[in-house]
Image (cartoon, rainbow, N blue to C red):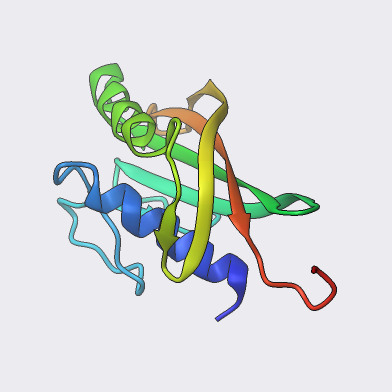
Amino acid sequence: MSWLTELRVGVAGATAAESNGLITFTRSGAYLASQLGVYGTILPEAPDEAISLVVGVVSEDIETVARASFRYRATTDSRLDMIEDALSNSWVKRQAGTLSGVAVIMAQWSSGASLGQDGNGRLIRSANFYITANRPLRNRT
């Protein structure tokens, strides 16, 4: 797998593992209707509660800085608050560790916003985090 894919899998897996059972992640993307799953780029039409995660490189220097962009949907503000709490608990000021084989130096809050409602009246928010990591590149010394 590519480095970005491994980082995305690591971020999704850590988010689920640290959510006290609120969030589920499977590499296959298959979830039960009762599970709050982490999907790829696009929020699926169903279920009502879902999280999408996109990871991309923001800058390359001595380390790589990547942005983890979460969009999450629920039917009530209180459920959105629970999801946001789980994301913040997992990623705000996270210190060094390894995620799916990727060496992470730290993570920090970037931004977040209410994105309104979708066509079915479900509420959507976003949360973005910067993750500083060691990315092996051929010309990096």
Report the front residue among 30 and 136: 136
In the rendered structure, the answer to whether residue 79 lies left or right of residue 139 reads: left
Report the front residue among 75 and 67: 67
**Relative to 136, residue 98 above or below:** above
From the top left corner, tell me how far across and down residue 10 is, in percent: 42, 61
In the rendered structure, the answer to whether residue 121 lies left or right of residue 106 reads: left
- Name the residue located 47 percent from the left edge and 33 percent from the top edge: 119
From the top left corner, tell me how far across and down residue 56 is, in percent: 66, 54
Decide if residue 36 is in sight here: no
- Name the residue located 80 percent from the left edge and 78 percent from the top edge: 138
Q: In the picture, which quadrant includes the N terminus?
A: bottom right
Decide if residue 106 is in sight here: yes
Report the front residue among 25 and 115: 25
Q: Quadrant of residue 84?
A: top left
Q: How many marks?
A: 0
Q: In the picture, which quadrant includes the C terminus?
A: bottom right
- Name the residue located 30 percent from the left edge and 18 percent from the top edge: 77
Furthest-front residue in this view: 141
- Name the residue located 44 percent from the left edge and 42 percent from the top edge: 95
Report the front residue among 74 and 106: 106
**Relative to 138, residue 75 above or below:** above
Q: Quadrant of residue 64?
A: bottom right
**Relative to 18, residue 28 above or below:** below
Q: Quadrant of residue 22?
A: top left
In the rendered structure, the answer to whether residue 18 lies left or right of residue 29 reads: left
From the top left corner, tell me how far across and down residue 23 is, in percent: 24, 47
**Relative to 85, residue 25 above or below:** below
Furthest-right residue in this view: 139
